[in-house]
Image (cartoon, rainbow, N blue to C red):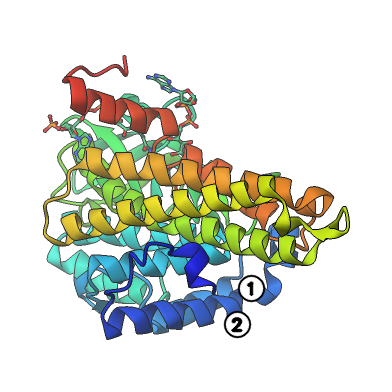
Amino acid sequence: MDTLATDFLNTFQDLDESQLLIKETVHKFVQNVFMPNITENFENAHFPKEIIKEMGKLGLLGSNLHGYGCAGLDEISYGLIMKELERGDSGLRSFASVQSSLAMYAIYAFGSEEQKKYFLPKMATGDTIGCFGLTEPDFGSDPAGMKTFAKKSGDSWVLNGSKTWITNAPIADIAIVWAQTDEGIRGFLVEKGTKGFSAPEIKNKLSLRASKTGSLFFDNCQIPNENLLEKTEGLKNALMCLNQARFGIVFGVLGAAEDCLNEAIHYTKERIMFKKPLASFQLIQRKLALMSTEIAKGNLVALQLAKLKQNKKVKPAQISMGKQNNVQIALDCARTTRDILGANGISGEYHCMRHMCNLESVYTYEGTNDIHLLIVGQHLTGIAAFE
Ligand code: TGC
Ligand code: FAD
């Protein structure tokens, strides 16, 4: 890794030994285990499930949760993990985000002690895979309107409805499902094999191809009361899970951006045009300098948010600012690198086009770019402009 290009302001110069080791270990894991097959996996829309348990062994799943077999790392370490995973592919980071920050966190924060003891250790090792169903076909940015309904019936709940665009759904053993009830929105653990529950894959994605996405259908599913996340009492709890995952994206996307910048620098030093390396032209250097500057700014944003989060002082709107800003930076870097590589930029032999396609999803999921601007706008003005 060329750290001058990607950390121009030495933002991460004060990492402690353990943080440096984590960063290096995940980097090596991604390069040695994941990257050799990424081009083929992306082409074939294949997610390499076999690496999940290795991620578990390295402590990468639920890494910033404490107890229950989780690594209990600090927030900077968690961010660095996300960054190294997404340097490989946003799909790999997506898997870890959903497993850790959405599914495991939901159980960790809102589950009963029995649920935590039963599910979290198996999820930390990667033996049990989770997904998180909030979005519905007609309720994406506005999940408050969800139609999925759970009706209390004796000792259980009867669940009807559907969720869509759910990461990990086709490979998940358990789904965290948010549903309306007579008492407001609550979270449920729906186990694979539950009668009336199916999770078919969504095919033909042109983005995040090395990640599995699906729908969730519930047809009179009987959910035992012990699978209710007992501490859930409204949409707010689902949004609290999103804060965790959005924070991971703030770091993660910079991994993809840095990979693009490194690719652009390397390519332009080698590629001769008009008898000179592309890197010697002013317009090219301007593009590289702007990419490096934006990445440096993004890293400062990420580090500051990690510090606030570590001290339990971070506000959701601050995470929204970071998500919106850093995803935009990463997408711009991927597009600029694609441009700089000319025709080669569209080839799977290089990484920028894959990152660019992936980042189009990241721009939309976990709250669209515009929704995050509206959240910051609401914070600045006190006026919600969503409706
Ligand atoms: P609103 O009335 O503003 O809020 C309802 C209650 O929730 C509180 N709240 C939050 N609490 C914690 N964290 C947050 N981020 C919160 N945002 C709001 C709020 O204070 C209120 O509390 P209370 O006590 O008054 O009840 O709710 P609204 O319905 O007007 O919606 C606001 C809006 C639009 C910002 C929200 O719905 C939103 O964020 N929409 C975007 C939806 C979204 O991000 N979906 C993501 C689905 S999961 C996903 O994409 C995973 S991709 C995974 C991967 O592969 O990596
Ligand atoms: P819409 O809400 O229909 O938005 C469409 C456009 O309208 C956007 O540009 C948006 O910014 C704009 N818009 C919407 N409302 C307003 C407004 N009030 N003012 C101005 N503009 C507005 N969801 C999950 O629950 N779990 C998952 O694991 C998950 N994984 C995903 C994986 C992938 C690959 C993708 C693509 C999505 C995933 N999602 C997941 C869904 C994702 O969270 C939603 O796509 C996202 O919240 C946006 O919802 P939508 O697609 O319905 O777009």
Q: Secondary structure at mark 2?
A: helix
Left or right for 222, reference 278: left
Asked if 35 appears above or below 326 in the picture, the reply is below
Query: Residue at left 28%, top 53%?
Result: 244
Q: Secondary structure at mark 1?
A: helix
Query: Residue at left 30%, top 71%?
Result: 77
Reading the image, the residue beneath label 1 is 35
Asked if 90 appears above or below 119 in the picture, the reply is above
In the displayed orientation, state which residue is furthest to the right: 275
| Residue 205, x across and y down, in percent | 66, 44
| Residue 241, x across and y down, in percent | 27, 49
Marks 1 and 2 in Cβ contact (< 8 Å): yes
The residue closer to the viewer here, 38 or 278, is 278
Numbered label attached to residue 32:
2
- Name the residue type under label 1: Met
Rounded to the nearest angstrom, the CA distance separating label 1 from label 2 is 6 Å
On-image quarter of the C terminus: top left
The residue closer to the viewer here, 309 or 71, is 309
Classify residue 344 by image quadrant.
bottom right
Left or right for 259, reference 144: right
